[in-house]
Amino acid sequence: MSRIHVRTHRLDEATAKALLAKHHVGSIAIAFHDRVTIVLVGYVYSGGWIYGRMEEGPDLTTLKHHHWVAFQTNEIDGIYDWRTVTVHGSVQLLFDDGSTPRGAEYRKAVELLRTAVPAVFTPRDPMPERVQLFRLYADTIEGREAQSDSVTGLPPA
């Protein structure tokens, strides 16, 4: 009879940041009073910021008033073999308002998102309803990892 042994540990900061940079799908937790909503978003991590976009609706309306969120991305190999990174920080909504610094951040966000999905904000955009760009400052980054191995109690063959 075999059993599984699972070890968990924290990821160091460099490994957690590398995991954020490697992936492009994550979830944002948006809280308002006693309700938390989880929103799946495409993103790009660059320079301590997570850049993404959302569609108009109640979640975006909440973000306009309550900008503190949690963000998470995962890498899952199995039920006991995974890596996850959670970020807490403040969301800033980005607008293209010409040649101001805010407009420059908007254009930078579009450029970064196009490294993951070149069709973003073009006629071939696969999700044209996601019209609001945002960036999330990664105030705190915490990574965890679980690894399993099978223990049979029998000597190696």
Image: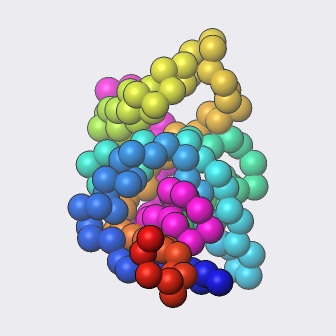
Q: Residue at position x 50%, y 83% from top?
A: 154
- Residue drawn at (52%, 75%), measured in percent from left and top? 150
126 versus 66 height, above or below:
above
In the picture provided, is 76 more to the left or to the right than 38?
A: left
Q: In the rendering, at what x and y percent does residue 94 appear? A: 47, 42
Can you give x and y, in whole percent of width and height, for residue 139 in the image? 34, 68
Nearer to us in this view, 26 or 107: 26
Q: In the picture, which quadrant includes the N terminus?
A: bottom right
Residue 76 in sight in this render: yes
Where residue 128 sits: x, y (%)? 67, 26
- Residue drawn 35% across the image and 38% down it: 105
Q: Residue at x 39, y 45 (%)?
A: 22
Task: Residue 5: say if magenta.
Answer: no
Q: Main secondary structure of the magenta part?
A: strand
Please state the horizontal and vertical placement of residue 47, each as a whole percent of the image. Answer: 26, 48
**Vertical side of 149 occupied by 57: above or below:** above
Q: Count of labels shown?
A: 0
Determine if residue 103 is in view. no
- What is the quadrant of residue 62 in the picture? bottom right
Say whether residue 89 is magenta: yes
Q: Residue furthest bottom?
A: 153
Q: Residue furthest front?
A: 157
Out of 60 and 141, give the one closest to the viewer: 141
The quarter of the picture where residue 156 lies is bottom left
The colour scheme applied to this rendered structure is: rainbow
- Quadrant containing the C terminus is bottom left
The magenta stretch spans which residues? 73-99
